[in-house]
Image (cartoon, rainbow, N blue to C red):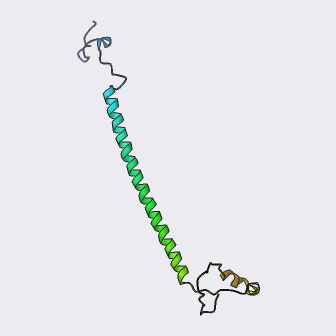
Amino acid sequence: MGKLRGWKQARGARASSVNAVPQLRDPWEKKLQMRAERTAVLAAQKAHDDEIRREKREDRERREERERKKKENKEKGLQYQVISDTKKIKKMSKKQLRQIKKADTSGVAPKYNISGGS
């Protein structure tokens, strides 16, 4: 065995006799438990994502509805003058032509602009 020095620890059992080998695989029950936990987490995450998507979609729909109503109300309050004689358009200047807007006024009585613009 050789000399035993005081500052060295005496060797216990040989390394080959120690049987504490770690398992390479997890037990089946642990695998099932981990799988169940993962499925629960994924389901919760999917529900959360769906909730966020739903809220964003509702916000977008509300915003679009507000914009649509705003546009309709703006068009309702506009004053316009119907150009029945199309020859006038050929005589107009570029600035006047830029101000002309095509609109469907079927079934609506014409309003006449007091300010003098078209």
Taking the image as shown, residue 6 lies to the left or right of residue 31, namely left
To which quarter of the image does residue 101 belong?
A: bottom right
Question: Is the C terminus in the top left, top right, bottom left or bottom right quadrant?
Answer: bottom right
* Residue 4 percent location from the top left of the image: 25, 11
Taking the image as shown, residue 61 lies to the left or right of residue 41, namely right
Please state which of residues 32 and 18 is positioned toward the viewer in this rendering: 32
Q: Residue furthest left?
A: 6
The structure residue drawn at horizontal position 53% and vertical position 75%, both measured from the top left corner, is: 71
Please state which of residues 94 and 55 is positioned toward the viewer in this rendering: 55
Q: Is residue 40 above or below residue 71?
A: above
The structure residue drawn at horizontal position 37% and vertical position 39%, both measured from the top left corner, is: 39
Q: Is residue 7 above or below residue 83?
A: above
Question: Is the N terminus in the top left, top right, bottom left or bottom right quadrant?
Answer: top left
* Residue 96 percent location from the top left of the image: 69, 85
* Residue 90 percent location from the top left of the image: 76, 84
To which quarter of the image does residue 58 belong?
A: bottom left
* Residue 97 percent location from the top left of the image: 70, 82
Number of numbered markers: 0
To which quarter of the image does residue 108 belong?
A: bottom right
Q: Is residue 18 above or below residue 112?
A: above
Taking the image as shown, residue 1 lies to the left or right of residue 93, namely left
Q: Residue furthest front?
A: 107
Q: Is residue 29 above or below residue 4?
A: below
The structure residue drawn at horizontal position 47% and vertical position 68%, both measured from the top left corner, is: 63
The structure residue drawn at horizontal position 44% and vertical position 59%, both measured from the top left corner, is: 56
